[in-house]
Image (cartoon, grey):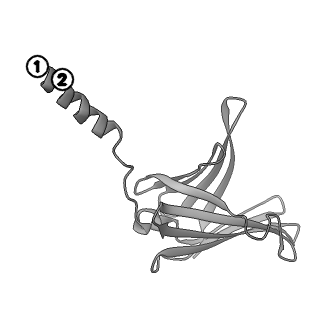
Amino acid sequence: METLLLCLLWAVQGEVQAPARDFELEDVAFIAGVWQNEQDGVHIEEVWSEPNGDSMMGMFRFVQDGKGVFYEMMIIEKTDEGVVLRLKHFNAGLIGWEEKADVHNFFLEEASATEAVFVKRDTPQRLRYTLGGDQELVVRLEELKEGEWSAETFAFKRRH
């Protein structure tokens, strides 16, 4: 009886400790495209390439009253640690916000045909990409502040 209980306990622990799903770039391929939104003199745009090899390339541009305010350069890579979204910020003139070797790393934790959730491991932040039909993409930067999640939301329409 004791041996049976130990075997059951070992089996349950094995299930609980099972590694996360091994994601592929195809799990986030729905992000690819040219996505834009314009409202009250602000134009935002996010552009993603199709998966090719082990990566996808992306860029974000924020333009206010006809002037570039800030940019993000992004890449989604398939690595030994999983699928990782990496990004860096820049002001106009391509002046970097982060130090030369610093980059923000968000690891893919959830994916479906219409949603991908990337989680930052060193701070409580998530990037959530949600596809609405084939013409809308909503990107939410979610942060845990004082025990509650808050979000900055960017809604885009596909440009043809």
How far from the left and from the top, in percent, is residue 76?
55, 68
How far from the left and from the top, in percent, is residue 81?
47, 60
Q: Secondary structure at mark 2?
A: helix
Does residue 116 show up? no
* Quarter residue 13 falls in: top left
Q: Are marks 1 and 2 in contact (CB under 8 Å)?
A: yes
Going by the numbered disc 1, the residue's amino acid type is: Met
* Residue 5 disc label: 2
Residue at the bottom extreme, as displayed: 53
Crowd band around label 2 with a 10 angstrom C-alpha radius: few (<14), some (14–19), many (20+): few
* Residue 42 disc label: none
Q: Which residue corresponds to mark 1? A: 1
* Quarter residue 39 falls in: bottom right
Q: Secondary structure at mark 1?
A: loop
* Quarter residue 66 falls in: bottom right
The image quadrant where one finds the N terminus is: top left
Q: Is residue 62 above or below residue 51?
A: above
Going by the numbered disc 2, the residue's amino acid type is: Leu
Residue at the front extreme, as displayed: 3
Q: Is residue 101 left or right of residue 135?
A: right
Q: Residue at x 47, y 58 (%)?
A: 133
What is the number of callouts on the image?
A: 2
Q: Is residue 2 left or right of residue 79?
A: left
